[in-house]
């Protein structure tokens, strides 16, 4: 991270897509194909200045529901705003916000897939996939109604390419129509 720390540190808002669970209070750190990062990584990200963490990505279920919940516990213990993965329906519907320099930001996150992994059918935890158009619309519109700036993080597209797909363009237009101001893809 030495090459980006000077870019992140002075930012008033620094958003990180944390691609891996951080659940080593319960589970051992691991690498490909099912990641789990040590809490020291999360602590480093906080020390660098990241203050909003998106877990709307394909690896959030690498350690299952237990790993997802442990990851949320970790960020909560550090008092860091996290979005894109939710404990339950109430958590999903409570749009995270952060006021910076008198501007109120809200955050929602969606993912295209979770590498074929799914929450158990009886799980209370929630993720929102890009196929859930009505849920995304509801959340973006709600975020727009409570803040000045809506940040949508969406994990989508074809890996190892920067080519934007027609589907991404279509969804991005919908996000804007619903109230998104910033789309991080």
Image (spheres, rainbow, N blue to C red):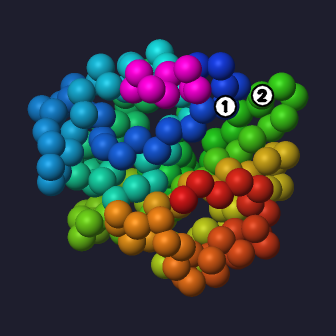
Q: Secondary structure at mark 2?
A: strand
Residue 65 against residue 111 in the figure, above or below:
above
Q: Which residue is mark 1?
A: 13
Q: Earlier in the sequence, mark 1 or mark 2?
A: 1
**Magenta span contains residue 5:** yes
Q: Which residue is mark 2?
A: 100
**Magenta span contains residue 74:** no
Residue 139 quadrant: bottom right
Q: Nearer the viewer, residue 174 or 140?
A: 174
Which portion, as a residue range, is magenta?
Answer: 1-8
Left or right of 8 on screen, residue 116: left
Q: Nearer the viewer, residue 164 or 94?
A: 164
- The quarter of the image holding the C terminus is bottom right
Left or right of 79 on screen, residue 141: right
Question: Residue 10 placed where, x, y %?
Answer: 65, 19
Q: Residue at (24%, 70%) from the top-left corner?
A: 116
Q: Residue at (39%, 26%) from the top-left corner?
A: 1
Of tags 1 and 2, the one toward the viewer is 1
Question: Residue 130 placed where, x, y %?
Answer: 50, 72
Residue 24 against residue 112 in the figure, above or below:
above
Residue 9 quadrant: top right
Residue 84 against residue 112 in the figure, above or below:
above
Q: Residue at (77%, 56%) from the top-left corner?
A: 181
Q: Residue 13: tell me if it is visible.
A: yes
Question: Residue 96 placed where, x, y %?
Answer: 64, 42
Label 2 CA crowd tier, 10 Å (few <14, some 14–19, many 20+): few
């Amino acid at each position: 991270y030495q090459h980006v720390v000077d870019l992140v540190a002075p930012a008033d808002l620094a958003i990180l897509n944390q691609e891996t669970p951080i659940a080593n209070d319960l589970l051992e750190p691991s690498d490909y194909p099912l990641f789990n990062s040590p809490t020291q990584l999360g602590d480093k990200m906080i020390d660098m200045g990241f203050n909003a963490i998106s877990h709307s990505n394909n690896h959030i279920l690498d350690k299952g529901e237990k790993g997802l919940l442990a990851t949320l516990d970790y960020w909560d213990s550090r008092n860091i705003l996290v979005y894109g993965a939710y404990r339950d329906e109430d958590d999903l519907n409570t749009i995270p916000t952060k006021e910076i320099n008198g501007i109120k930001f809200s955050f929602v996150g969606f993912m295209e897939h979770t590498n074929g992994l799914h929450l158990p059918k009886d799980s209370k935890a929630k993720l929102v996939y890009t196929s859930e158009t009505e849920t995304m619309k509801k959340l973006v519109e709600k975020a727009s109604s409570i803040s000045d700036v809506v940040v949508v993080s969406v994990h989508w597209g074809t890996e190892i390419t920067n080519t934007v797909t027609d589907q991404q363009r279509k969804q991005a237009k919908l996000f804007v129509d619903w109230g998104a101001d910033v789309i991080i893809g």
